[in-house]
Structure formats: C-alpha cells, structure tokens
Image (cartoon, rainbow, N blue to C red):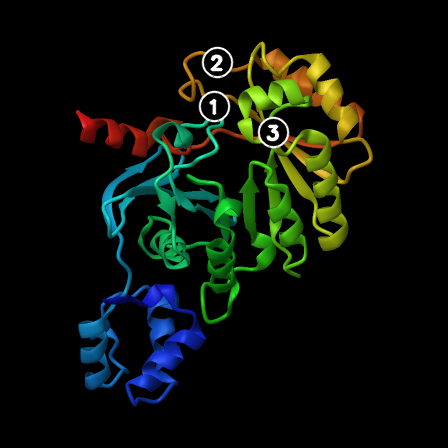
Amino acid sequence: MRINIIDLDPGQLEELIVSWAMPRFHAKQIFTWIYQRGVFDFDAMSDLPVALRKRLGEDCDPGTMRLNETRRSVDGTEKFLLSLADDNLIEAVSIPAKGRVTGCVSSQVGCKFSCRFCVSGKTGFQRNLTSGEMIEEALYLKHRSSARNLTHVVFMGSGEPLDNYDNVLKAIRMMNAKSGLNIGARRITISTSGLIPQIQRLAEEGMQIELSVSLHAADDRIRSMLMPVNKKYPLKDLIAACRQYRMKTNRQVTFEYVLIRGVNSSLADAQKLGTILRGFDCKVNLIPLNAQADQGLKPPQKNEIAFFKNSLLKNSIHVTIRQARGEDIEAACGQLRARHMQQRRA
C-alpha cells in the first residue's frame, strides 16, 4: 500500500527514512520542499539522493488530491472542488483580504448534523478526512491558489471538525509547526455546531486555537428546529462549556448567528441573545442567510439586521456583520459539491 507523505508528521517521516537505511535529516528536506516550496514531485527535490527519490516514487505519494473544478469570484475569493483518492469530493476556499489570506478547509466528506440552512448536510455523511487530506487542502490553497499565500486557516468547510477530533488536531499541529505551514495557533479557527465533550477536551489541549460556535438561536425550541444537535447539547450547557473554554484558554469565543427572517431575527430574539451572553467576553458574528441555503427560509431585511446589532451593542456585546464573499461562485459550504453530486446522479 502506498504511503501519502502528507499523512506523516516529521517523526513518522524520519522513521520511514531510517527504515530505508538512509539518514533521518532527509525528512526535513522533504518537508521543506512540500510545505515551504510547494514542490510535490519527488524527482524535482534536487538535494535528495537519487536512490531516495527513486524509493519515494516507488512507495509514496506527495498528496492524493486532484482538481475537479475551480471558480474565482470578482472579490478575489477562489473556490476549489477537489477529488480525493476514493473519488469523493470536498471543497476548499481561498479568501484574500487586506494583509491576510484565509483558507477555509473541510474536515469531513459531507456532514451528519443536518443543520437546516447548511447545504453540506443535505448530501449526507460519507467519511472523515484524514489529517493528511486536511493538510493537503491547506497546501493546495497556499501554493496553487491565485493568492499564493496562506496566513489563516478556518475549519469552516464541509463537516463538523470536532466530530473528527483526532485527525483535526493532528492536522492543526502540522499547520502550526515550524516544519509545517508555520501558522500561529491564534490564526487557526475551529467552527463547531456545539459538541460539548469535545469543546471541553479542546480546552485542555494547551493550544491557543480560536473557537467559533454556531449558535443561530437564543432559545432551545428554535435552535433544535434549525440544529438537531441542540437536542443532545442544549443552549444552557453549551454556553457554560464555552464560558469554561474562555476561562481555560483566555481566548475570546465567537458565536456565529445566521439571521433568518421570521425565525430568529426579531428584536425579541436579539434581547434573548443579549441575556444569555451577558457578562461573557465573546463576539457575535451576524450572518444574513444565504438565500440558496433553503428555499423555505428567507434572508433578513436590512433594518432587521441593524436593529439586531444595535440591541446586542446595548448589552455591551461585541458584534460584527459578516460581509458576504464569493456569492457569485457558490462559495458557501457545500454548494458546488452538491451541484456536482446532482450531476453525477443524473
């Protein structure tokens, strides 16, 4: 069975090189070629012995993904539909902004949590991604996107990152490592639907990872309707776990809140949210609903967004409104993959 080099951390690659009766320092050279220079062809790694390059070519792959489709938005956002070795499809997005380039990566093929407004869950869950596959997404964005850079990573693509906990943490450690992508932990964000045991576990990791929690409602009835996971992990317990995360890590938690007209966008909803977050050093990121997410749901009106935001500000809650990016290229999670899945079934 061939080995995907990107599935290996530095220690594992050293062990492999040594098992071939070659000096372990070659592992560092290989990592430099792949992570820093974006070279994925073993034959092009000119400072490696010919014998090692031959052995690598015989036994290993420098990644397994293939580009299926790419789209570039007028705002510079670039979306990649990538085929995995088993022909499953995932999406990764490069989002350039002033002084930064954020990579949005997927953690699973599909999703099992079925949030009503999210396209990813509508195609069902297939499998977890390996740590190497997630790292390869980030490498693809760094070296093959138009931006040719990657300063931040958000696990906000398809899938629930904390449902694939061990692989996600292994990927993050390589993204953070100097021998890897060398991205600071505070520039890496995990977005979760609210898996409380994993949030508590993450708080004990001793890493300064940013935590973003999909909230989307200020009471259990509405949240359970939008997010079935709330039936297992209700709001009161979730907010308590997030407060604990803030205390343990000293990192501000971000709550994502998709505004949906007639569902969770009223002034009364804003006041409820202000109450449950009162005294919590957190940030609320308001996201007007993407109209394509669910034909039965509608985006809020502009005055609703303004009233909602001002209500939170009056409760001394830090609040922002997410600017839409890449709407012209189906950049929201799962849209491009879902369309390709429909075409395959046709």
Farthest residue in the top direction? 262
Mark 2: amino acid = Leu
Residue at the (28%, 45%) spot, across then down: 82
**Quadrant of residue 159 in the image?**
top left
Mark 1: amino acid = Phe
x then y, percent, for residue 221: 64, 18
Q: Spatial distance from mark 2 to mark 1, Cα to Cα?
A: 8 Å
Image height of 61 relative to 304, above or below: below
Judge depth for marks 1 and 3 and give the one in front.
3
Choose between 228 and 88: the one closer to the eye.
228
Mark 3: amino acid = Asn
Examine the rendering and report whether any part of residue 315 can be seen. yes
Number of the label disc, if any, that sits on residue 117: 1
Q: Which residue is mark 2?
A: 297
Answer whether labels 2 and 1 touch (C-beta < 8 Å). yes
Dot 1 lies on which element? loop
